[in-house]
Structure formats: C-alpha cells, structure tokens
Amino acid sequence: MHPPMADIPAGTVDLRDDRRGTRWQTDVAAFRLGRYPVTAGLYGALTATGTPADPTPADAVPLTNISWHDAVELCNRMSAAAALPPAYSHDPATGQVVWDRGSDGYRLPTEAEWQYACRAGTAGYRYGAIDDIAWYDGNADGRAHGVGAKAPNAWGLYDMLGNVWEWCWDLYDEEVYGSYRIFRGGGWAESERGCGATVRRRSHPTFAIDDLGFRPARSVRPAASGTF
C-alpha cells in the first residue's frame, strides 16, 4: 500500500521568520509530495495492525499523535515496503538522524518544499476560501476529518491547510531551540488566522499531539544521460 503522490515542478519560494524578522528565497528542485497526510489506514497497512482490504471511515483520518522521530521511522517503513532505499539513518556516534539526499525513498518535505507546494503557484496566505479548503476550529467540530473532503490546491494536494499540522525536516533556529523541528499548515484546533501557507511552528522531535501528523515526500532522481 503506497501513498498517492503528486509531481511538484521546480521553482523558487520566498520564506520568512517573523520572530527573527528575516526573509530569504530558496530554490526548490522538482520532487514528489503525498496528495494527503498519512492516514491511520496507511499506518495500519505498514505496521500490519490494520485491515486494508476492509477500510473503515476511521482509516481515512490523518495519523496523529506521532513525533518527528516516529514520522522519520514511518518514512523508512514506506521505503522498505516499496523496495526503495531508505532516506534516513542514525549516526551511531551522535544518535542524530542523517538524511541521505541521494535516496529517492520516502522522507519528510523540507519547509521550503512544503510552502512551495502548498501555494501551488499562488501568492496569497491561502490558496482558496478557508471553509472550502480546510478543517479548522470554525468548522471541524473538535476533531480531525477524513482526508480529501475539502477542495485541493492547483497541484492536486489536499488538506495542506487545516485538519492536521505537518512535520517538516528542518531544524528551527538551532542556536536558540536546539533540536526543535518545524511543522506547518495549521490543524483542526487552530483558529482561521493560524491556517496559512506561511505559518511556522516548532517543537521538540519527541513531541506528539492529536492535531499533528505528516505527509511524505520523495526526491526525483535526475534522468540518466546517455551516450550518443
């Protein structure tokens, strides 16, 4: 069982950190991104705890209560299930997670990739009217909802805003926050203001809560050049 993925074209994205008052631009190479956050059903299939042949509505709800470390492990599980090289390993000397950037296995998106894909060529705070695209505290009735029930963005990505926050690969201001990692997008418990393409939050990589999940990404290997 593999997550449906969308092809994201190369481009550039403007990022900002309002806490530090900084802005910067980043080039984004072409990559692939999950059309939906990872669901409870996909988790069940990967861990042999579910019954993918007999899905229930609960299987479509985003997987939550997972830490950044859990998300990294699940990315490697997805890679193994698809016979792809793992994107992550652990440095035995430091215990830190190491990303093999040459791998095309499943991984977490960088925050630049996440924001670029969320906007899908638009320039505003959101890619549509919030009630059309997102579950948030004004319409979610205090819970996560099955993925794909709201309208997608222009690149066919669902639930980029609202429903659940999504872990990204990046550290957040390592000098101040140490190992804290970034998550993006807003969740079902968030206010309307807190669900936008540029919203950035952070927490310790062991942090887990009921409105935080992730969606997988994959790098695109350059096409092999032939000899003519």
Image: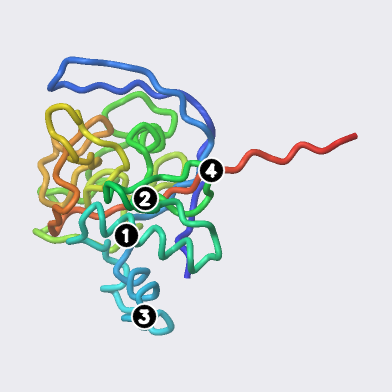
The answer for how far apart the CA atoms under marks 3 and 2 are is 26 Å
Q: Which residue is mark 1?
A: 147
First in sequence: mark 4 vs mark 1: 4
Could you tell me residue 183's position as x and y percent? 23, 42
Q: Residues within 10 Å of mark 1 (few under 14, many from 20)?
A: many
Q: Nearer the viewer, mark 4 or mark 1?
A: 4
User: Which residue is located at x 31 percent, y 37 percent?
Assistant: 128
Task: Say what amino acid the circle numbered 3 marks.
Answer: Ala
C-alpha distance separating marks 2 and 4: 27 Å
Kindly state the secondary structure of the residue where label 2 is placed.
loop
Q: Which residue is mark 2?
A: 158
User: Quick check: marks 3 and 2 in contact, CB under 8 Å?
Assistant: no
Q: Where in the figure is residue 60, as x and y percent of width and height?
A: 32, 68
Near-viewer residue (92 or 149): 92
Residue bearing the label numbered 4: 102
Q: In the image, residue 215 lies at what x, y percent?
A: 35, 52
